[in-house]
Image (spheres, rainbow, N blue to C red):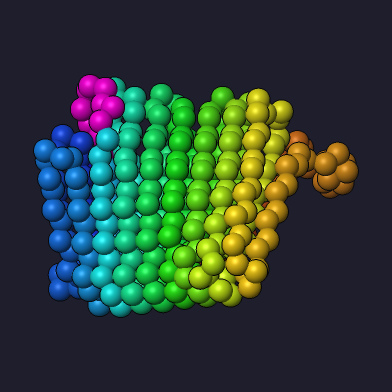
Amino acid sequence: MKNLLKKNIKIKLIKIIILNNKKIYKNKNINNLINIKLIILKKKKKINIIIYKLKNKNIPIYIIYIYKNKYINKKKYNINIKIKNNNNITLIEEYYIYNNCNNKYINYRYNIKLHKNIILNYFKIINLNKKIKFLCKKNIKIKKNSKFYENIFLINSKKISIKNKVNLYKNSVININNISMIKKKNNIFYKINIIHNKSNSKSYQKHKNIILSSGIIKFIGIITILKKANNSIAILENNNLYFNKPNFIFTKPQLNIKNKKTKCKHKVTINNIDKKIYFYLSSRCLNKNKIKKIIFIIFINDIIKKIKNKIISKKIYKIILNKYK
C-alpha cells in the first residue's frame, strides 16, 4: 500500500480507499475543504459517495479500489456518486491489485448524478494485469447548466467491457476523451449511448484506439436527440491506428435524430502507418521502433494536451508510454 501511494499520489488530495474485503478507509489529508459523506450498505453491496461543497477546486478527489483477497470474485458492486449544486471538482478513479490476489473479475455498476451548476473533471484509468476481466456499466445524469469532462484510459487488461448511458438536460455538456490500447490479444468492447432530452445540450466525443499487436476492439456509439432537444449539438469521432494487423476492428456509429434544429457530425477512421511516412522518417536516420514511437505519441498527444492539470497529464502520459514498451 505504501508503494502505491508513493508512486501514484504526488499531489495534495483527498483519498477515499475502498477494499474488496468490505473494509472502508476514508482519509482526509486536508481538513475543512470538502464535505464527503460515505455510506456503505454491506448486504446490498452498495457504496454511496455524496459530495456537498468544495471550497478549493484545485484539490482532486482520488478514489482507489484495492483488491487483496485470494479468491475469485464475480459479484457486482453498485457505486452511487452524487455531486450537489455549485461544485467544481476533479475526480480520479484507479484500481490496484495485490500480487497474491487471484481475482479474475472486476465488476462495477456506477450511477453518477450531477446536480445544477456543476463542473466535473473525471479521470478513469484501467491499468490491470493480463489475467483480469474488467466489466463496468455506468448511468450518468447531467442536470441543468452542468458540465462533465470525462477522460478514460483503457491501457491493460485481458478483457474490458464498458457500457455507458448518458442523459443530458437543458444547457448541459458532456465531453468524452478516450484512449484505448490493445496489446497481446487483448479484447475491448466499448458502448456508449447519449440521450439529449432538453434544449441546448451538447455532447463531444473523441475515441482513439491503438492496436499495437493482434487483438479485438468493438466500438458502438449511439446518439439520440429527442423532440424537445432544440439547438443541440452532437459530435462523435472515432480514430483507429494499428501497427500490426489486428484480429478484428468493429466500429458502428448510430444516430437517432427526432429534432431538425440540431447539429450532428460523426467521423470514423481506420489507418495503419503509411509507407511514405516510413520512408521519409527513415531518411532522417530513424529506425522502425523510433518511427513507431513518434507516430504513437503524435496520435495520442491531442487528448493528453486537453488535460489542464499538468501533474495528472504527466502521470497518465508515463503510464501509457510504459505500456507501449
Q: Classify residue 267 as left or right of residue 22.
A: right
Q: Nearer the viewer, residue 112 or 5?
A: 112
- Image-based side of 172 in relation to 230, left or right: left
Principal SS element in the magenta part? loop
Q: Which residues are magenta?
A: 66-75
For residue 234, above or below residue 54: above
Residue 15: quadrant of the picture: bottom left
Task: Locate the C terminus and report the quarter of the image it occupies.
Answer: top right
Which residue corresponds to the image point at 51% horizontal and 70% vertical from the top-left?
228
Q: Position of residue 5 (x, y in %)?
A: 28, 48
In the picture shown, does residue 63 fall above or below 29? above
- Queried whether the magenta region covers residue 72, the answer comes back as yes
Q: Who's the residue at 44% across and 56% down the image?
A: 166
Which one is nearer the viewer's eye here, 225 or 325? 225
Q: Quadrant of the N terminus?
A: top left
Q: Position of residue 101 (x, y in %)?
A: 27, 26
Q: Is residue 261 visible?
A: yes
Residue ID at (71%, 28%): 245
Q: Is residue 157 above or below residue 306?
A: above
Say if the magenta span includes residue 141: no
Question: Can I make out residue 13 in this image?
Answer: no
Residue 11 located left or right of residue 177 = left
Q: Quadrant of residue 23?
A: top left
| Number of marks drawn | 0
Residue 273: image location, x then y, percent:
78, 40
Q: Nearer the viewer, residue 161 or 263?
A: 263
